[in-house]
Image (spheres, rainbow, N blue to C red):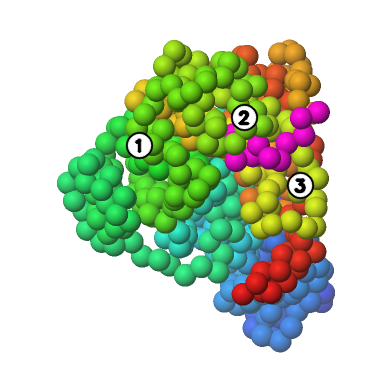
């Protein structure tokens, strides 16, 4: 123990409270009916001086700034979150001594991680940041907080993996791009707080138990039949498979149908990326959440607009009537059925990689030409409730497609047909006058750098918005590097998206649509 003489007992008796300075720290001392107590003078909430607080009967100290309350005798935080650091006190020869011995670093790290659990349950953004900062300050690894958050939340998403895990992989990649401690903390906090927000108020939805020897065909059959118990047991049997094999397996399942607005493929790449960044100890929770999402994925290829998907995939590369010129303009503004026919016909004469480049440019041009009047209007059908986030999916899907199909080329046909669907589904909501305003490559590079910098202080209140800012920015930047011919259009589309005021609450439109809906019941 390290006892330090800090004050005369008579002085504390006279004043009832005092502040001692020990090795740069301020320690508050209080004389109460139950004895003398010492604690950090800084409130663990926002650092205001507890020596200016109020003392109530029973040794309850209140921080008057935000009403946090601490029982000095038991150490319990009665109102608030974080625990208050207290110090042992003794009287010796009329002097007050306190023990300032620091707990081992490992103890402080474990305490920060345990406190992080409470912060996640409360979706307390500031406290999440404080606990991660404390963890790293005491020599801990911030990624341990990440792993803990995944284990804590993975079975609280009723319908499987959400944007929170997908964008978490992007935030971790962004974290590797900087040495700035504040920016690195932002990446951790944004991702973990998003996980907490998506899990808020949710009960646990336990996964079926058991494990089966890995069988790719059996896994595909279980997903097709929407049999979660079988799929879960099989994926547990694949936890030790190489990342490349897992990515191919998940991507193949995701591309079997045009489904879930492209999330299935996007999430497949992000799930495996999390394993690469965090290690195999998160493989089970991440992959179980992903598999549950596949089970619940909506089958959009059963909708009239996309019903040609299976047939076009079976007849990939066959010409069907007139073949349009091999250029992005042949896809811009045309519906999904027409675009699927076009890219399938192109496959007779062009490599998939070349078709991808043309389709990517078309997707980027749609992003730069979104007619924002569609998002602002207060009338129209529910099916026409289209906004900026819908338009970003073609680019983020394209990025995921290039990643998986480059490694597994036989996935190109399915992926390109689905990319054609994304371009086509947005065709009726563009403003053609906005096309053709792409910057030159040098300007595009500067725009991407500025866009990435802004992500660390995006200012958005909704995690779903910030998630789309992050994943669209990083996808556009990656595809601009991979396909320089698309860089200008990608930069132009991203610039419009980032600058746009996104309308999130459509009060009048919703009221009109629901009145019409009820009237037709």
Query: Where does label 3 land, which residue?
Result: 374
- Marks 2/1: CA distance? 22 Å
Labels 2 and 3: the sequence-earlier one: 2
Image depth: mark 1 or mark 3 in front: 3
Where is residue 131 drawn, in percent x and y?
59, 53
Magenta stretch, residue numbers: 423-433
Which residue is at the front of the view, 448 or 226?
Answer: 226
Query: Where does label 1 land, which residue?
Result: 252
Labels 2 and 1: the sequence-earlier one: 1
Q: Secondary structure at mark 1?
A: helix
Residue farthest to the left, as pictured: 213
Task: In the rendered structure, find residue 363 and report the number of the disc placed on it.
Answer: 2
Q: Is 21 placed above or below 65 here?
A: above
Which residue is at the front of the view, 239 or 104?
Answer: 239
Identified at 55% across, 32% down, the residue is 338
Q: Is residue 126 visible?
A: no
Identified at 49% across, 29% down, the residue is 341
- Marks 2/3: CA distance? 18 Å
Q: Residues within 10 Å of mark 1 (few under 14, many from 20)?
A: many
Relative to 348, 117 lies left or right: right
Q: Is 253 placed above or below 21 here?
A: above
Labels 1 and 3: the sequence-earlier one: 1
């Amino acid at each position: 123990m390290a006892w330090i003489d800090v004050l005369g007992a008579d002085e504390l008796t006279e004043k009832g409270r005092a502040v001692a300075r020990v090795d740069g720290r301020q320690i508050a001392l209080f004389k109460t009916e139950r004895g003398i107590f010492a604690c950090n003078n800084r409130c663990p909430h926002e650092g205001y001086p507890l020596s200016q607080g109020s003392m109530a009967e029973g040794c309850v100290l209140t921080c008057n700034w935000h009403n946090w309350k601490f029982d000095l005798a038991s150490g319990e935080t009665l109102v608030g979150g974080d625990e208050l650091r207290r110090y042992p006190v003794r009287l010796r020869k009329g002097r007050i001594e306190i023990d300032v011995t620091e707990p081992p670093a490992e103890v402080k790290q474990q305490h920060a991680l345990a406190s992080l659990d409470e912060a996640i349950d409360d979706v307390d953004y500031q406290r999440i940041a404080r606990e991660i900062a404390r963890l790293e300050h005491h020599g801990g690894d911030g990624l341990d907080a990440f792993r803990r958050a995944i284990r804590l939340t993975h079975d609280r998403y009723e319908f499987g993996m959400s944007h929170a895990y997908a964008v978490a992989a992007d935030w971790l990649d962004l974290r590797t791009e900087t040495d700035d401690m504040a920016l690195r903390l932002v990446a951790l906090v944004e991702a973990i707080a998003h996980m907490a927000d998506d899990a808020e108020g949710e009960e646990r939805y336990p996964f079926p138990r058991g494990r089966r020897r890995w069988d790719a065909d059996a896994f595909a059959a279980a997903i097709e039949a929407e049999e979660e118990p079988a799929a879960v047991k099989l994926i547990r049997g694949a936890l030790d498979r190489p990342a490349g094999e897992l990515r191919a397996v998940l991507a193949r399942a995701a591309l079997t149908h045009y489904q879930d607005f492209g999330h299935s493929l996007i999430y497949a790449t992000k799930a495996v990326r999390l394993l690469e960044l965090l290690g195999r100890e998160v493989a089970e929770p991440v992959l179980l959440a992903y598999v549950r999402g596949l089970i619940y994925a909506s089958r959009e290829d059963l909708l009239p607009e996309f019903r040609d998907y299976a047939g076009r995939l079976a007849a990939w590369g066959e010409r069907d009537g007139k073949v349009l010129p091999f250029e992005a303009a042949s896809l811009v503004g045309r519906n999904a059925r027409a675009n699927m026919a076009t890219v399938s016909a192109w496959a007779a004469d062009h490599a998939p990689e070349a078709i991808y480049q043309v389709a990517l440019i078309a997707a980027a041009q749609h992003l730069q030409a979104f007619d924002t009047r569609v998002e602002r209007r207060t009338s129209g059908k529910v099916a026409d409730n289209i906004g900026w986030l819908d338009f970003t999916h073609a680019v983020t899907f394209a990025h995921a497609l290039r990643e998986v199909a480059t490694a597994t080329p036989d996935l190109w046909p399915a992926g390109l047909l689905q990319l054609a669907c994304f371009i086509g589904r947005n065709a009726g909501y563009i403003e053609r006058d906005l096309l053709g305003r792409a910057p030159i490559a040098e300007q595009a590079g500067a725009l991407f750098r500025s866009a990435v910098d802004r992500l660390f202080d995006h200012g958005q209140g909704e995690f779903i918005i910030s998630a789309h800012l992050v994943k669209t920015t990083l996808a556009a930047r990656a595809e601009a590097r991979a396909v320089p011919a698309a860089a200008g259009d990608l930069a132009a589309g991203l610039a419009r998206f980032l600058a746009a005021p996104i309308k999130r609450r459509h009060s009048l439109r919703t009221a009109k649509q629901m009145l019409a809906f009820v009237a037709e019941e």
